[in-house]
């Protein structure tokens, strides 16, 4: 029983991290139809900012955390301004290639000007201590991660439903030009989507760094791959879908880890993606894919 | 009677889609407080003209609003200057509630209490929308969506209202209701540019009309004289 509960919490915290990452991709995709593969490099920027703050500025972990989240958010907004704005109304493929380009350029900048090797950051180890919860031992990091994701989901929902900018972003996911025809500035809506995406990347960065304890140029690759898979499973462009896909991916991963016999351990990912493929056979557009606007123009 | 001042003044307007020219240099004007109608068959360039005024297509020539040339004015700033549109196909935000649609319509306003009051006023005008205020706009019927689209366009408190085919695809009873609403707006002093295929109903509530075909203006005149021109009316109703 204890073992099951423990694995359940594992699944939940993995899922929470994927959900956080997937939301960062989904919010930009829903507004401008762009799969932002440079999201991972935004996370890496957060990681390198941690290094810079820890070695040059302060040992206070809270300032380091704040600095890295702010850096990730600013980077995201800056990327929109310099890289994605010019291709805003272009073909989706153009946006996709631009995102890959940005990703490659940033990775090479890290390689050239920082270091190809991992750099250790020890400031966040304090987040990861074992705690007893109802008789089971879990890592405090898992708890923080799950709680943080829940807070993000609630905050994002309130923002989207209760504020005019939130409504504008939802409207934009359906008909961007109509939002402009309401007099709501397209530039602000795009900037806001990237700002939120960057904040989510910064938050995810904290947990990733606390667990790994080091940053290298490819820090963001795996997380973004997982976020992409979560988005596809949940339905690309749907925010609830991103959350659902994230948690589902976490559950499937942990389930495979637990259920597969030892000798098949190396094939864990194959089984995970096999199950994902089956879900996509069942729902080719993802589980909660947003309805396609068919329009009623005669 | 002195002529009312011109609100919208279009001259030699051409509209381009890539290399294709859809409107070939038309000129028209909408005086303040009047209802002007653009008639014409499908593909005549009516909606392109509306898009040109909104700034969503590539154009040449001039569109002047309250004496200001809009050539370098963004879509958003045109709305802020007082141009609002109920577009062809209605384009309500079907993934948002009726109320949220109206709130977005008022997106450029900052007077929260007045916005609330305006929304309540619309719900009294159209009780059916009020009953469904929390429902997704996509679940409304075509006529309800059209009312919502017009109400949404008016939430920004525009100086001029552009109505693109408000009667398209609606049942006759609903069409009469929509035209009643437009007539009421006109009586309240709203300046309206109406695009319609339903010539008879449109001319009844309009002051002036233009007939557009294949991207050029073929005829223009006071709405009453349009109605008396049997040959023209036969052509128009035949086209519609």
Image: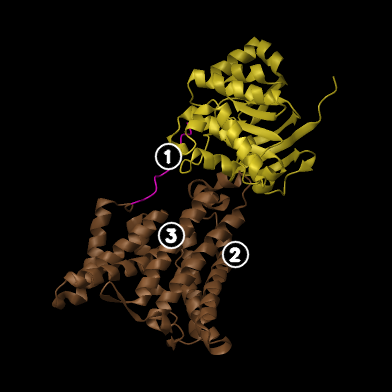
Chain colours: A brown, B yellow
- Tell me the number on the disc at residue A81: 2
Q: How many marks?
A: 3
- Write the start and end of the magenta stretch as one range: A288-298
Q: Quadrant of residue B227?
A: top right
- Tell me the number on the disc at residue A153: 3
- Tell me the number on the disc at residue A294: 1
In the rendered image, the vertical position of residue B2 relative to residue A69, given as above or below: above
- Tell me the number on the disc at residue B32: none
The residue drawn where x is 30% and y is 61% is A248
Q: First in sequence: mark 2 or mark 1?
A: 2
The residue drawn where x is 50% and y is 41% is B93
Chain bearing mark 3: A
Q: Residues within 10 Å of mark 2 (few under 14, many from 20)?
A: some
Q: CA distance from mark 3 to mark 1?
A: 29 Å
Q: Position of residue A94 (x, y in %)?
A: 49, 60
In-image side of A159 versus A153 (left or right): right
Contact, mark 2 vs mark 1 (Cβ under 8 Å): no
Q: Residues within 10 Å of mark 3 (few under 14, many from 20)?
A: some
The residue drawn where x is 55% and y is 68% is A79
Q: Do discs 2 and 1 belong to a common subunit?
A: yes
Asked whether the viewer can see residue A284, the reply is yes
């Amino acid at each position: 029983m204890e073992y099951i509960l423990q694995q359940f919490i594992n699944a939940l915290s993995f899922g929470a991290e994927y959900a956080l990452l997937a939301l960062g991709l989904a919010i930009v995709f829903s507004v401008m139809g762009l799969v932002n593969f440079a999201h991972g490099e935004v996370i890496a920027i957060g990681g390198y900012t941690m290094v810079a703050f820890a070695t040059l500025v302060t040992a206070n972990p809270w300032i380091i955390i704040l600095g890295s989240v702010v850096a990730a958010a600013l980077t995201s907004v800056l990327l929109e301004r310099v890289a994605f704005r010019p291709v805003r109304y272009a073909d989706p493929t153009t946006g996709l290639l631009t995102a890959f380009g940005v990703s490659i350029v940033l990775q090479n900048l890290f390689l050239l000007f920082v270091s190809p090797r991992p750099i250790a950051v020890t400031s966040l180890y304090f987040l990861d201590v074992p705690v007893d919860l109802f008789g089971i031992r879990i890592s405090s990091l898992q708890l923080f991660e799950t709680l943080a994701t829940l807070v993000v989901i609630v905050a994002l929902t309130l923002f989207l439903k209760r504020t005019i900018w939130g409504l504008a972003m939802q409207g934009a996911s359906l008909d961007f030009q109509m939002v402009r025809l309401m007099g709501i500035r397209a530039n602000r809506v795009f900037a806001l989507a990237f700002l939120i995406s960057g904040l989510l990347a910064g938050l995810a960065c904290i947990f990733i760094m606390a667990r790994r304890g080091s940053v290298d140029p490819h820090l963001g690759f795996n997380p973004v791959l997982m976020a992409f898979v979560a988005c596809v499973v949940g339905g690309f462009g749907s925010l609830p879908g991103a959350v659902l896909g994230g948690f589902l991916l976490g559950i499937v991963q942990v389930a495979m880890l637990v259920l597969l016999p030892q000798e098949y351990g190396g094939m864990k990912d194959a089984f995970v993606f096999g199950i994902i493929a089956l879900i996509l056979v069942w729902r080719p557009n993802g589980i909660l894919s947003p309805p396609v606007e068919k329009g009623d123009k005669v | 009677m002195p002529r009312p001042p011109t609100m919208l003044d279009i001259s030699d307007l051409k509209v381009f889609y890539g290399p294709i020219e859809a409107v070939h240099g038309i000129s028209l004007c909408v005086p303040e407080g009047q209802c002007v109608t653009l008639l014409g068959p499908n593909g005549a360039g009516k909606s392109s003209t509306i898009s040109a005024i909104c700034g969503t297509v590539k154009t040449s020539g001039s569109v002047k609003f309250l004496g200001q040339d809009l050539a370098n004015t963004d879509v958003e700033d045109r709305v802020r200057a007082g141009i609002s549109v109920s577009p062809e196909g209605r384009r309500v935000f079907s993934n948002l509630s009726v109320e949220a649609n109206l709130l977005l319509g008022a997106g450029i306003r900052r007077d929260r209490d007045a916005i609330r009051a305006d929304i309540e006023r619309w719900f009294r005008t159209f009780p059916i929308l009020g009953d469904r205020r929390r429902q997704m706009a996509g679940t409304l019927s075509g006529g309800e969506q059209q009312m919502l689209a017009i109400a949404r366009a008016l939430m920004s408190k525009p100086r001029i209202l552009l109505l693109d085919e408000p009667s398209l695809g609606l049942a006759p009873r609903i069409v009469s209701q929509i035209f009643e609403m437009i007539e009421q707006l006109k009586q309240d002093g709203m300046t309206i540019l109406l695009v319609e295929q339903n010539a008879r109903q449109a001319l009844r509530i309009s002051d002036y009309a233009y007939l557009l075909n294949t991207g050029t203006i073929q005829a223009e005149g006071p709405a009453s004289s349009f109605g008396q021109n049997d040959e023209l009316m036969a052509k128009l109703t035949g086209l519609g």
